[in-house]
Amino acid sequence: MFYVSRDGVLFDLATFDVPVVRTAVVNSFDSDWTVTRLDDPLFKNVINESGSHVVEIKMDSEAVGEKNSEESFLSTLFPPPPPTPQIYITTCSLETRNVDTQEVIASEPVFRTEEVDRYTSLLNVLSENMILFKSTRRFKYNSYQCFLAVKTNDQWSRIPIDFELGEDVEVTGWEIVKEKDSILFLLYSEEEQKAYVSSYNYQTLSVEKTIELPSCYYSGDSCYRFEYVKLRVLSGAQYFSVYQTFDESEKTDSINLAIFTTTDLTKVKEITIPRVPKSLIVDVAVVSPDLNYVAYGIDPFYLFDVKLGKSVPLRTSRPAYYRRLITDWRLFDPYEAVIFVSSASIWFVGFSKDSQTLLASDLSGDVFEWDVSTKKRKRKIVNIDY
């Protein structure tokens, strides 16, 4: 299986060390996928691995204050009462283990949290001395608060991230810009129905700048419209884009993207992709660093030329499905067919820093490389013949 970073670098997940590969996953978009999330064995919580020892993040969570059986029984007879507050206690430590015997040699405490109707989980490892975590609401999984665990003078501290926008503003996406020692956070205020992007410097531990986003990038008919907004840093980390995604149940005639600088969050360009196919699942929209092209869609997968105002289809999973159907009778089963088509769809995309090459990969071990200017495929690495 191959992973394509946002800078268009190809990583072979089968041969690279976990800490090396994980440094490429610096955005919430990719880390939401099954294969690259931190609880997957390929991206396990390894901080450091050298010789016969490995240092891993160990998190233990305990929920207290569960509903009793009488409450549960009564809720079946009458309108259910307000949910009982749930207390989550989370302890985090770094465990040093012997690789051969798995024996725990040392345990270093990092933090302990006790929160009402919130639970703590890992987001990203910035370095051996700095780790990003999130605190998620019990009944709302698409937004959360963030904090850092920072080690100075052999002591760990829990550093909350305050955007100074009010208590109801929470994080819905993030991008780590290591080139600028900062993290871009996508924020939303449910009470005011406003969206923001904030730049946070993790060296000075301070917010650098915050901007409000135009409502056209997250408004819509659905009350959950903002759940589908994505933040994406472009290859080279000079710019980032904000765009609204759509699934197969919705109809859209166009995709709107806004491009901003990563330094001072100034808007430099707006791109509209017209005549988007009604059945297209728009979950990926990656802009080239020269701002002249947009790769979008999962299946089919398109390349949009901004100057020409024209989209060119690059790939679809249908040939793969029909070829496999001839030899594998299991694909007559609708469930198996959906799984195969999903695996053969585009999952990871990245432009090279010179905007000349586009790389993409699926979950079947296939990699595709296109020449951007000619829109022609230059080569492919395939496990399936299609």
Image (spheres, rainbow, N blue to C red):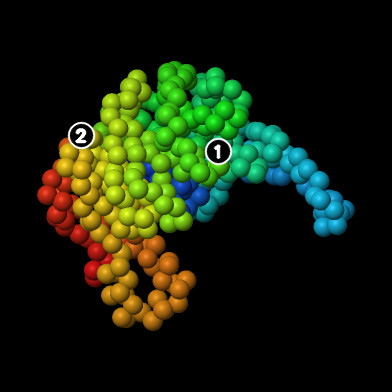
Q: Earlier in the sequence, mark 2 or mark 1?
A: 1
Location of residue 112 in the rendering, given as x and y in whole percent from the top left corner: 65, 33
Task: Tell me the element at label 1.
Answer: strand
Residue at 50% x, 50% y is 39
Looking at the image, residue 87 lies above or below residue 320: above
Q: Which of 320 and 299 is in front in this view?
A: 299
Residue at 85% x, 57% y is 77
Which quadrant is the N terminus positioned in?
bottom left
Left or right: 221 as drawn, with respect to 138 = left
Left or right: 127 as drawn, with respect to 292 = right
What residue is pinned by disc 1? Answer: 143
Location of residue 219 in the rendering, given as x and y in whole percent from the top left corner: 47, 37
Q: Distance between the residues labelled 2 and 1?
A: 32 Å
Which quadrant is the C terminus positioned in?
bottom left
What residue is pinned by disc 2? Answer: 290
Residue at 20% x, 34% y is 290
Image mark for residue 343: none
Task: Tell me the element at label 2.
Answer: loop
Q: What residue type is labelled 1?
A: Ser
